[in-house]
Image: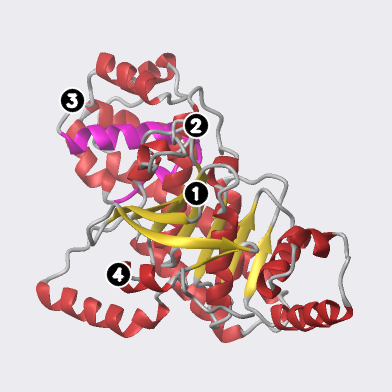
Amino acid sequence: MNQNYEKAVIGSILLEPAVMDTVATTISSADFIDSELGEFFGLLKDLADIKRPIDDLLLLQTEVKRRELSISNACIVELFARVPNAHNAKFYAESVREAARLRKLSLLADMIKDQTNVPGANSGDIADYVEAKIKLMDSANKIEISDAATVVQQYDYQEQASGNTIYTGIEKHDRYFGGFTGGELVLIGARLGTGKTALGWQIAIHNAQRGRRCLFVSLEMNSNQLLQRHLASELQIDSIKVMENRLTPDERDAIAAEKNRFAQYPVSIFSPPSATAKQIAAAVRLMSGRGIDLLVVDYIQYIRPNKSRERRQAELEETSKQLKEVAREHEIPVVALCQLNRQADESKAPKVSHIADSDNLGRDADRVLLLHRRQDSTDLRVAKHRYVADNAAIELQYRHGRFEEPGTDWTP
């Protein structure tokens, strides 16, 4: 029955495009249980927003092919004939919204059950989480316009919450370019073996040491390998010695002490053999009841697409959009590491367009940082920044699995 209403609401829009204004304030493409219909509804809304004729069958078939949507031409033709008129479009849309809301409540119930089973669960935190999720659920399709006074109040609140800014720990970067803020998608790109995992982990640990709750998603290494790298880096011990357990008594004592310190950090690791962006979003939701301040994903090209497409570029662009949604939903920075392609010549500074498998992956990102290895050092290049001039480079030294600024007297 739900899919009948979903088809009916789209059929109403195709018959009378003017009803899109009413329908679009009631439902979104995410409310459709049939993903093909949801994608097609999103296409109709996009076309309506740019004043294109959404009742033109030829145009729709062309756009469906261009966007590589799954819906068939036969299904589109069927939708045109689905309803005799558009008089009940609002009723159909409300029915779709109600069904979607019930599904979301069912999913929320499962999340609550998971969170109540976590050792040390706090009922107040869980209640706040539920209240926030229901509020988000009820306001998802509403049009909210803020007057100047409301904007100022919201800005003042953001200023008060500015203590939640996530810093990299690289002093020159944080001073000139500022920390990462809630809702931002940050890409850190590098060629193979240049240290992107090390930098991503370094940022996570820098914040965990300061009480920030971090989730590190590793699709390349398991948690034991990450801890091994961490111990070698923090204590400046050769990683091969740590791996092969060829340690002096003093080094063993230092590692035992660092393990105890690490066990107290508010950092969690999700290291499945493979994962989709939806599974990563689910992991963030599981943590959100206890609070989460930063998500680091290593790395974006390893994220399995929710739905296989003919073009790899389309898969990656969908993944980046989903990571951006996670950042905005939970008001946290999402730092996604990414591989650069072979066109990123080591003799030249890399560009955003050098991100592997996608010419446009950086489009959704608020910031893009690129590592460029030089003969005796590594540049951290700010290739994109929404608020200040970009294309600046910060010189770093890579030592024992971590990046330091030249002249820094760092001791573990």
Dot 4 or dot 2: first in sequence order is 4
Classify residue 258 by image quadrant.
bottom right
32 inside magenta stretch: yes
Residue 17 in percent (x, y) is at 20, 32
Residue at image point 44% right, 45% down: 320
Q: Which residue is mark 1?
A: 375
Q: Residue furthest front?
A: 376
- Describe residue 367's horizontal placement relative to residue 100 as left or right: left
What secondary structure do most residues of the magenta stretch adopt? helix
Q: Amino acid at mark 2?
A: Arg
Q: Mark 3 falls on what kind of element?
A: loop
* Neighbours of disc 1 within 10 Å: few (<14), some (14-19), many (20+): few
Real-space CA distance between mark 4 and mark 2, rounded to the nearest whole angstrom: 30 Å
Q: Give percent across and percent down for residue 104.
A: 52, 57
- Mark 4: give few (<14), some (14-19) or many (20+) Cα within 10 Å: few
Where disc 4 sits, the SS reads helix
The numbered dot on residue 53 is 3
Q: What secondary structure is marked by label 1?
A: loop
Where is residue 377 shown, x and y percent of the image? 49, 56
Q: Nearer the viewer, residue 251 or 180?
A: 251
Q: Nearer the viewer, residue 321 or 265?
A: 265
Mark in front: 1 vs 2:
1
Viewer-proximal residue among 51 and 27: 51
Q: Which residue is mark 4?
A: 176
Q: Callout 2: few (<14), some (14-19), or many (20+) C-alpha neighbours within 10 Å?
A: few
* Residue that numbered label 2 is attached to: 342
Q: Quadrant of residue 362?
A: top left
CA distance separating discs 1 and 2: 18 Å
**Numbered label tally:** 4
Sequence-first disc among 1 and 3: 3
